[in-house]
Image: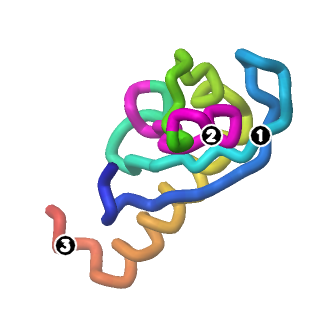
Amino acid sequence: MNENAPHTTTNLECPHSRKKCDVNFEVNVFRGVTHGGVEAITCTEFLHNNGAPTCGQECIHSSQAKNIHEEEVRKHQKELAKIGPNVIG
């Protein structure tokens, strides 16, 4: 787990168990949402495993995960805009 990466918890229906659960997503704003941009770090469906998901993490393809990724990308772009357009160049 990357402590510097944005983390967001959301409630969603697990694609695997079809139960409502809270999932903590880690977001990588430099990758696409389905290419490592979102990773499930903890999930209430896996409390017996200290919350670490042992499923296929199909939840990263959910609309909630995509919205979380888009929001974090927007926040990141807003922060970069404060620095200036010629910094990354």
- The quarter holding residue 46 reads top right
Q: What residue does disc 1 label?
A: 21
Tell which of 85 and 33 is nearer to you: 33
| Labels 3 & 1 near each other (Cβ < 8 A) | no
What kind of residue is marked 1?
Answer: Cys
> Which image quadrant is residue 15 in?
top right
| Circle 3 or circle 1, nearest the eye | 1
**Number of other residues with Cα within 10 Å of mark 1, as a class: few under 14, some 14 to 19, many 20 or more:** some
Location of residue 60 in the rendering, given as x and y in whole percent from the top left corner:
58, 30
Query: Where does residue 55 sit, x and y in percent of width and height?
Result: 55, 19
Find residue 89 and report its image quarter.
bottom left
Question: Which residue is at 53% across, 61% downward?
Answer: 74
Question: Count of labels shown?
Answer: 3
**What residue did someone put label 2 on?**
47
- The boundaries of the magenta stretch are 35-49
Residue placed at 58% from the left, 49% from the top? 24
Q: Is residue 87 above or below residue 9?
A: below
Q: Is residue 79 above or below residue 20?
A: below
Mark 3–mark 1 Cα distance, whole angstroms, equals 43 Å
In this rendered view, identify the residue nearer to me: 29 or 9. Answer: 9
- Which amino acid does the dot numbered 3 rest on? Asn
Where does residue 71 sit, x and y in percent of width and height? 60, 57
Residue 70 rendering spot, x and y as whole percentages: 58, 49
Of callouts 1 and 2, the N-terminal one: 1
SS type, badge 1: strand
